[in-house]
Image (tube, grey):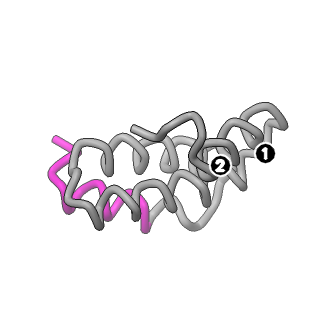
């Protein structure tokens, strides 16, 4: 997963602390993109799942696109 000194990880921690769920969706998607690029499917799905949950909680339109990405990985049964 992310390292404690990773700027993206620091942004995720700050967004959690602030309760900024909109930012969390964006940041978790960014983390998923990074892991997807490196070929780490498990981590990609981990981050997408978090992004999806926060997007659903916020009623964001992004939830459908994130859900589609999860489905493309077979993360939904």
Q: Secondary structure at mark 1?
A: loop
Q: Are marks 2 and 1 in contact (CB under 8 Å)?
A: yes
Q: Which residues are magenta?
A: 65-77
Does the stretch in magenta take in 76?
Answer: yes
Report the residue marked by disc 2: 24
Locate residue 25, reporting x and y percent: 60, 54
Residue at 31 percent across and 63 percent down: it is: 69
Q: Quadrant of the C terminus?
A: top left
Marker disc for residue 6: none
Per the image, the residue denoted by label 1 is 20
Q: Main secondary structure of the magenta part?
A: helix
**Residue 2's x, y, as percent?**
46, 41
Query: Residue 70: x, y in percent?
Result: 29, 54
Residue located at (18% from left, 56% from top): 73
Residue nearest the observer in this picture, 66 or 29: 29
Q: Is residue 73 above or below residue 16?
A: below
Side (left or right) of 49 relative to 3: left
Residue extending furthest toward the front? 5
Left or right for 66, reference 57 = left
How many residues crowd around disc 2 within 10 Å: few (fewer than 14), some, or many (20 or more)? many
Say above or below: 52 vs 2: below
On the picture, is 50 further left or further right than 8? left
Cα separation between marks 2 and 1: 6 Å
Task: State the image coordinates of residue 33 (x, y, percent, origin top left).
Answer: 40, 64
């Amino acid at each position: 997963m992310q390292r404690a000194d990773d700027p993206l990880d620091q942004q995720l921690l700050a967004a959690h602390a602030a309760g900024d769920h909109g930012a969390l969706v964006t940041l978790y998607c960014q983390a998923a993109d990074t892991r997807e690029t490196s070929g780490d499917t498990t981590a990609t799905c981990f981050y997408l799942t978090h992004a999806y949950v926060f997007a659903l909680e916020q009623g964001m339109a992004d939830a459908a696109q994130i859900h589609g990405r999860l489905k493309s990985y077979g993360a939904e049964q």
